[in-house]
Image (cartoon, coloured by chain):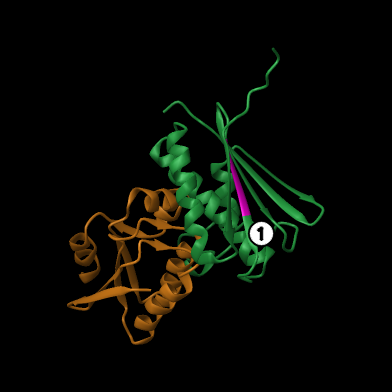
Chain colours: A green, B orange
Amino acid sequence: MNESRVFPRIRLSIQSRLDHVFLVGKSAWALSRYAGFGESEADSIELCLVEAVTNAIQHGYRGEKDHSVDIDIILFSDRISLVVSHGGQGPLHVPKEPSEVDITDARSLPESGMGLSIIRRVMDHMTYATHGNVHVWTMEKRRSDE
Amino acid sequence: MRMEHTLIDDVLVLVPLDARIEAANSAAFKGAVVDWIHKGQRKIVLDLIHVEFIDSSGLGAIISSLKNLGKDGDLALCGLSKPVMNLFRLTRMQRIFQLFESREEAVSKLAH
């Protein structure tokens, strides 16, 4: 029998409210730990998902609270995949990479735009796609042998 | 943003009581700290003992506090949980801020 493997997958959906983002962050943390990620990696995965969903709410929906953001979490055998989908404005809001921080001058420190660079630093793979009116942000993190 | 405060000599210790500082409450957090700075407070210890999570918006609010203090002010942080320390390392901000394990160490540093 030729049966392809089906990996565990869950879909979470929240209202586009910043005060609800913690729900998906905490869920991603718990599922990461279940999937064998270390505590520090799970912390980083939670952080990345919070950054992506916050970006969708603030820039995709411009802060409007009566929309929905969908998050699919897939537990592959060697990695976790986080897929954030929304029907707001696209494409992805990509802030400029903050230039090298000058530690002698506090005025040069960035106050925003750090979310994407955090995701780039943590995740092994990141793609952004638009399907019709739906914008989809996919992030993947491989499990390391801690 | 719920926040306790204690004045030890000329050092103000601010203790956020919320478990998370993120996009939902970072503006309120920043406003609360900047209010103290505008009242003339120049030395501030931010005790993050109750904070379990900070995102880039929360970090931006802390950076903004440092900027508002200016060159004649001083800001120290203590009580960082593992996830919060992880954020500081990811963004390399541990090189920028004065970080201490205990409140006593942080206050002692600023009092001099």
Considering depth in this image, is A109 or A116 the residue closer to the camera? A116
> Which residue lies at the image location 82% right of the left edge and 53% below the top edge?
A132
Residue A73 forms part of the magenta stretch: yes
Helix, strand or loop at mark 1: loop
| Image quarter of the C terminus of chain A | top left
Q: Residue at x 29, y 61 (%)?
A: B50
Name above or below for residue A74 compared with residue A17: above
**Left of B4 or right of it: where is B96?**
right
- Percent across and percent down for residue B7 are 20, 77
Which residue occupies 48% across, 74% down? B27
Q: Is residue A135 visible?
A: yes
Residue A135 or residue B54, whichever sits in front: A135
Query: Tag 1: residue type?
Result: Lys
Furthest residue toward right? A132
Chain letter of the residue carrying label 1? A
Q: Which residues are magenta?
A: A70-74
| Residue extending farthest front | A1
Which quarter of the rendering shows the N terminus of chain A?
Answer: top right
Q: Which residue is mark 1?
A: A96
Residue B5 x, y percent position in the rendering: 25, 76
Q: Is residue B8 magenta?
A: no
Q: Residues within 10 Å of mark 1 (few under 14, many from 20)?
A: few
Q: Majority secondary structure of the magenta segment?
A: strand
* A84 lies above or below A4: below
Query: A35 or B35, which is in the foreground?
Result: A35
Quadrant of residue A57 in the image?
A: bottom right
Apparent side of residue B73 relative to residue B54 in the rendered image (left or right): left
